[in-house]
C-alpha cells in the first residue's frame, strides 16, 4: 500500500497536466485530493497500533528501498493531505493554469515520500526535488523580484544540502548502508569521535531546512513568503517546514544518545525568542507571519527536546496546531492583500466591518497562535510546558507574551475606521472562504476537543489537568494585558524596531552562518 501514497499524487499531477483542460483540472484536483484525504485517513487508521513496512524492489533488508508508515508519520501525511485540499479549494479561482496543479501534486508526492522513506540518500534526493518544485511555485508569476527570490532560495539550499550529503557519505563509509534503522543500530557500536563529523554535517543541513537560528534569516529575508502566491505560502509555512522538522527528528533518532538534545533545547528557545522579536519589528503582514513561522518552529523543537513524554507530545501536536492556524492566517492575509492592495499592517483597518468572514478567520487564527483558552494552540502549549524544568516553562511564557504583542499589532487590522478598499469592494468568493473558515473552525475545535484528539491521533493516555489548564489560562490573560500595554507604549510607531526589522544578512553572510553553526555543533558534541 505504501508506494501508492507517493504514486497516486504523481499520477494525478500527470493526468491533470496531460489529459484535462484548465477548467476541468481545477475541479478534478479538488475531487482527487478529497479522495486522497480519505486514503490518508485509512493509512492513519492502519498505522495507529502497528507500523506498516514495504520493501520496494527485489532487495530485502538494508539493501532495498524501505517505506515505513508509523503512527507519527501517518498523522503528518494526513495533515499534509488536508492542507493540500484546503489550498486546492482556495486556488480554484486564483490559479487556472494546469502547470500550477501539476506542481502542487508533485510537491505533495515528494512530502509524502519524505514521511515514509527509511533511506538517508532518498531523503537527500526527495528534499532536492521538493526544493526545485518550491522554487517553481515561488517564481510562478515570473516577476523579477520572484525570480531573484527563487534563485537565492535555490543557492542557499544547494549549500545546505551539501553538508547533509557529505554527512551521509561519511555514515556510509562507517556502516556500509543508508537504512535509518540499521544505521541507528550500528551507531551504538561506534566511537564518539567517529560520529562528531557526520553528525555535525547532517544536523547543519537539516537545521538550515528548519530555519533554526542563526540560519533562520533565509525564510523571510529572501522574500520567499512575501513574494509567493498566498496558497503556496500557506503550504510552505503550514507543512513544508514541518516536514523538515520531522526529518530533523529522524536524524536525532538515528544518532540516539549521541544527539545533542540539551543543546537543541537551548537552540529552540533562542530561535523562538529571536523569531518573535523580529516579528514584532515588522509591518508587512506576510513578513510578520513569516517570522512567526521561525518562532513556532523553535517552540516545536523545545517540545521535542525537553525530555518529557508530555512535552514531546506537545511538540507533535503543535506541528498540527501550527499547520492549521498558520495556514488560516496566510490564506486570510491573501484575501486582505487582494482587497486593500497593501501589506502594511498600519494601513489596513476595519476588516471586521468590510470583510466580516475574513475577520472571523483572522481572529480565530490569532487566538489559536497566541494560545488563547479553548483554542488549539493552548492545548499544544499546555503539553509542551507540562512537567518541564522551570526555565523551559518560563521560556514558553515569554515566547507567548511576545506572540501576543506581535498579534496585538496584527489584530489592529480588524478594528478601527475602515480603510478604503481597492476599487469596487471585493467580496471573497466561496472558494476562498470555505477552506479558510474550515481551518478557522478547527482552530476552535482542536482546542475544545484537544485532549481526546491528542489521544486519538497519537494513541496515548495523555490527559489535561483542569486546575493546571485554568492556571495557564490565567497566565494567558495576564500576558494579554501586559502585551497590550507593551505594544501601545513601546512597540507602536517605534522607529528603532523598524530599522532592526529591515536588517538583512544577505546571501554571503547567510552561507557564513552555516559554517559557524557547523563549527558550533562540532565543538558542542565534541565536549559532550
Image (cartoon, helix red, strand yellow):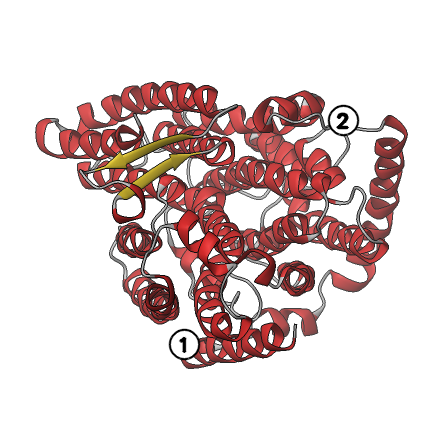
Q: Is residue 422 visible?
A: no
Identify whether 456 is placed above or below 285: above
Q: Is residue 284 visible?
A: yes
Check disc 1 and report the residue beneath it. 507
Kindly identify the residue that appears in the image at 9 percent across and 33 percent down.
18
Quarter of the image for residue 261 reads bottom right
Give coordinates of residue 155: x percent, y percent. 32, 70
Give coordinates of residue 504: x percent, y percent. 51, 75
Judge from the rendering whether residue 150 lies leftward or rightward of residue 187; answer left or right. left
The reply to whether callout 1 and callout 2 are in contact (CB within 8 Å) is: no
Quadrant location, the N terminus: top left
Give coordinates of residue 338: x percent, y percent. 43, 42
Kindly identify the residue that appears in the image at 18 percent across and 31 percent down.
11
Q: Which mark is residue 293?
A: none
Along the viewing direction, whichever of 457 and 523 lies nearer the viewer: 523
Judge from the rendering whether residue 281 lies leftward or rightward of residue 148; answer left or right. right
Identify whether 522 is placed above or below 294: below
Few, some or many C-alpha atoms within 10 Å of disc 1 (few <14, some 14-19, many ≥20)?
Answer: some
Check disc 2 and report the residue beneath it. 463
Quarter of the image for residue 487 reads bottom right
Give coordinates of residue 140: x percent, y percent. 26, 51
Residue most extreme to the left: 19
Identify whether 288 is placed above or below 503: above
**Distance (Cα) linking label 1 and label 2:** 46 Å
Name the N-terminal-most of marks 1 and 2.
Answer: 2
Query: In the structure shown, which secondary structural element does the residue marked by tag 2 occupy?
Result: loop
Few, some or many C-alpha atoms within 10 Å of disc 2 (few <14, some 14-19, many ≥20)?
Answer: few
Kindly identify the residue that appears in the image at 31 percent across and 30 percent down.
2
Residue most extreme to the front: 189
Query: In the structure shown, which secondary structural element does the residue marked by tag 1 occupy?
Result: helix
Amino acid at each position: 500500500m505504501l508506494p501508492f501514497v507517493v504514486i497516486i499524487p504523481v499520477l494525478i499531477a500527470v493526468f491533470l497536466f496531460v489529459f484535462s483542460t484548465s477548467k476541468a483540472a481545477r475541479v478534478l484536483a479538488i475531487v482527487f485530493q478529497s479522495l486522497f484525504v480519505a486514503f490518508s485517513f485509512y493509512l492513519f487508521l492502519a498505522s495507529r497500533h502497528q507500523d506498516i513496512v514495504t520493501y520496494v524492489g527485489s532487495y530485502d533488508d538494508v539493501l532495498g528501498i524501505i517505506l515505513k508508515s508509523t503512527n507519527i508519520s501517518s498523522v503528518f501525511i494526513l495533515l499534509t493531505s488536508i492542507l493540500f485540499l484546503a489550498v486546492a479549494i482556495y486556488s480554484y479561482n486564483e490559479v487556472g493554469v494546469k502547470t500550477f496543479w501539476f506542481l502542487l501534486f508533485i510537491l505533495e508526492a515528494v512530502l509524502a515520500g519524505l514521511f515514509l522513506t527509511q533511506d538517508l540518500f532518498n531523503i537527500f534526493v526527495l528534499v532536492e526535488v521538493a526544493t526545485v518544485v518550491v522554487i517553481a511555485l515561488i517564481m510562478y508569476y515570473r516577476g523579477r523580484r520572484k525570480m531573484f527570490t527563487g534563485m537565492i532560495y535555490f543557492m542557499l539550499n544547494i549549500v545546505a544540502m551539501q553538508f547533509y550529503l557529505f554527512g551521509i557519505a561519511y555514515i556510509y563509509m562507517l556502516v556500509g548502508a543508508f537504512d535509518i534503522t540499521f544505521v541507528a543500530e550500528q551507531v551504538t557500536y561506534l566511537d564518539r569521535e567517529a560520529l562528531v563529523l557526520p553528525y555535525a554535517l547532517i544536523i547543519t543541513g537539516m537545521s538550515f531546512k528548519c530555519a533554526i537560528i542563526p540560519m533562520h534569516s533565509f525564510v523571510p529575508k529572501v522574500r520567499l513568503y512575501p513574494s509567493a502566491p498566498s496558497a503556496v505560502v500557506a503550504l510552505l509555512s503550514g507543512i513544508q517546514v514541518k516536514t523538515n522538522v520531522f526529518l530533523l527528528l529522524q536524524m536525532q533518532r538515528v544518532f540516539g544518545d549521541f544527539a545533542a538534545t540539551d543543546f537543541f533545547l537551548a537552540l529552540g528557545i533562542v530561535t523562538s525568542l529571536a523569531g518573535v522579536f523580529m516579528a514584532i519589528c515588522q509591518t508587512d503582514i506576510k513578513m510578520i507571519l513569516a517570522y512567526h513561522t521561525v518562532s513556532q518552529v523553535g517552540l516545536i523543537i523545545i517540545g521535542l527536546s525537553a525530555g518529557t513524554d508530555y512535552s514531546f507530545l506537545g511538540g507533535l501536536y503543535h506541528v498540527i496546531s501550527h499547520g492549521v492556524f498558520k495556514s488560516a492566517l496566510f490564506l486570510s492575509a491573501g484575501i486582505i492583500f487582494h482587497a486593500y492592495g497593501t501589506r502594511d499592517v498600519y494601513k489596513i483597518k476595519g476588516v471586521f466591518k468590510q470583510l466580516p468572514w475574513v475577520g472571523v478567520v483572522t481572529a480565530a487564527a490569532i487566538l489559536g497562535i497566541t494560545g488563547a483558552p479553548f483554542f488549539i494552540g493552548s492545548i499544544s502549549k499546555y503539553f509542551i510546558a507540562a512537567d518541564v524544568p522551570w526555565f523551559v516553562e518560563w521560556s514558553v511564557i515569554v515566547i507567548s507574551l511576545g506572540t501576543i504583542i506581535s498579534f496585538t499589532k496584527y489584530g489592529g487590522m480588524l478594528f478601527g475606521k475602515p480603510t478604503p478598499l481597492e476599487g469596487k469592494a471585493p467580496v471573497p468568493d466561496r472558494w476562498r472562504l470555505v477552506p479558510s473558515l474550515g481551518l478557522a473552525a478547527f482552530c476552535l475545535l482542536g482546542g475544545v476537543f484537544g485532549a481526546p484528539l491528542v489521544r486519538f491521533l497519537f494513541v496515548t493516555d495523555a490527559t489535561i489537568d483542569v486546575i493546571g489548564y485554568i492556571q495557564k489560562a490565567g497566565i494567558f490573560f495576564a500576558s494579554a494585558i501586559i502585551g497590550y500595554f507593551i505594544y501601545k507604549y513601546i512597540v507602536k510607531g517605534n522607529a528603532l524596531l523598524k530599522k532592526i526589522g529591515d536588517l538583512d544578512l544577505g546571501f554571503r553572510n547567510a552561507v557564513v552562518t552555516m559554517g559557524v553553526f557547523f563549527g558550533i555543533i562540532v565543538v558542542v558534541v565534541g565536549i559532550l
